[in-house]
Image (cartoon, grey):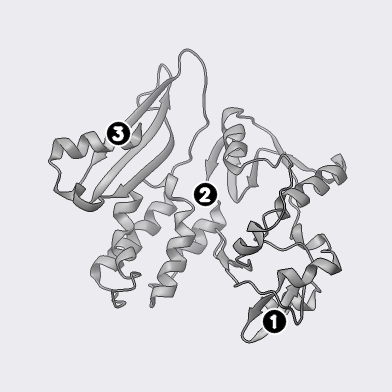
Amino acid sequence: MIRELESQGVVSKTHSPFNSPIWPVRKPDGEWRLTVDYRALNEVTPPLSAAVPDMLELQYELESKAAKWYATIDIANAFFSIPLAVECRPQFAFTWRGVQYTWNRLPQGWKHSPTICHGLIQAALERSKVKGPAREIQFLGVKWQDGRRQIPTEVINKITAMSPLTSKKETQAFLGAIGFWRMHVPEYSQIVSPLYLVTRKKNDFHWGPKQQQAFAQIKQEIAHAVALGPVRTGPDVKNVLYSAAGNNGLSWSLWQKVPGETRGRPLGFWSRSYRGSEANYTPREKEILAAYEGV
């Protein structure tokens, strides 16, 4: 990945008194994105005021304004299209396998990169660059159709085709890939809890029957995940919260229904394992806790 970026002129070798650790991030499709942990640099970077849309706000906007037709623009490697001032490059240095590099283009991980990128795109955007209209789109890594958010088919295929995991690192990467879609999976935390057990530092990696069962089950859940939304409004719309407490944790889900619908449509599923002494609560106390978490 770094070699490819270097060949493209996005990064280059350097000698700098500054250095930040790399922090690769696994994307929803399973590929890796090179990011750097710029928390120390971000702390001393002066503020920059600009209105950048929040991901959750954008998703709510799509869900609450369901449409049959969409238009999108997909800008590949947008940050890497924006040159970084030469005098600023030493501050963005990082090291990989004993070699120090720095960014020649806007890096991911720096707090002002999204603001700068969004502002430049907004200024340069032309209507002719917009893709569409289409009945369904892929936006923010999510498939959208009629205001409903779905897991893209290519993501489902990639996850379901994965072989049993053989190390803590592979398990952590798998959990990172599927965790992005946890709102689509009822009782997600309870299903994957055996996988989290083998990633703990104090535990040796052991892939047993429970891990294999959890691995197979979560892949099935991802393959058959329901679409979420759209968010509906109006006097006839009822919001219904369902909650439950099982042996291994809590789960709750939010649904909307209108007259004529038996159960309605889900807006999301949430879950978590018991913490501390919660596992020792009485069944009624656990049910109350699940309802509290849902509210």
- Numbered circle sitting on residue 100: 1
Q: Is residue 61 left or right of residue 197?
A: right
Q: Is residue 247 visible?
A: no
Tell me the mark number nearer the camera, choosing from 1 and 3: 1
Q: Quadrant of residue 42?
A: bottom right
Q: Is residue 111 left or right of residue 216?
A: right
* Mark pair 1, 3: CA separation: 50 Å
Q: Quadrant of the N terminus?
A: bottom right
Q: Quadrant of the C terminus?
A: top left
Secondary element at tag 3: helix
Q: Is residue 105 visible?
A: yes
Query: Type of residue at label 3?
Result: Tyr
Q: Quadrant of residue 285?
A: top left
Tell me the mark number nearer the camera, choosing from 1 and 2: 1
Query: Type of residue at label 1?
Result: Gln
Tell me the mark number nearer the camera, choosing from 3 and 2: 3
Secondary element at tag 1: strand
- In this figure, which residue is indicated by the disc labeled 3? 292
- Numbered circle sitting on residue 195: none
Q: Answer yes or no: do the residues labelled 1 and 2 have beta carbons within 8 Å?
A: no
Q: Is residue 289 left or right of residue 200?
A: left
Q: Mark 1 or mark 2: which comes first in sequence?
A: 1
- In this figure, which residue is indicated by the disc labeled 2? 151
Q: Which of the two residues, 212 or 17, is positioned nearer the viewer here?
A: 17
Q: Mark 1 or mark 3: which comes first in sequence?
A: 1
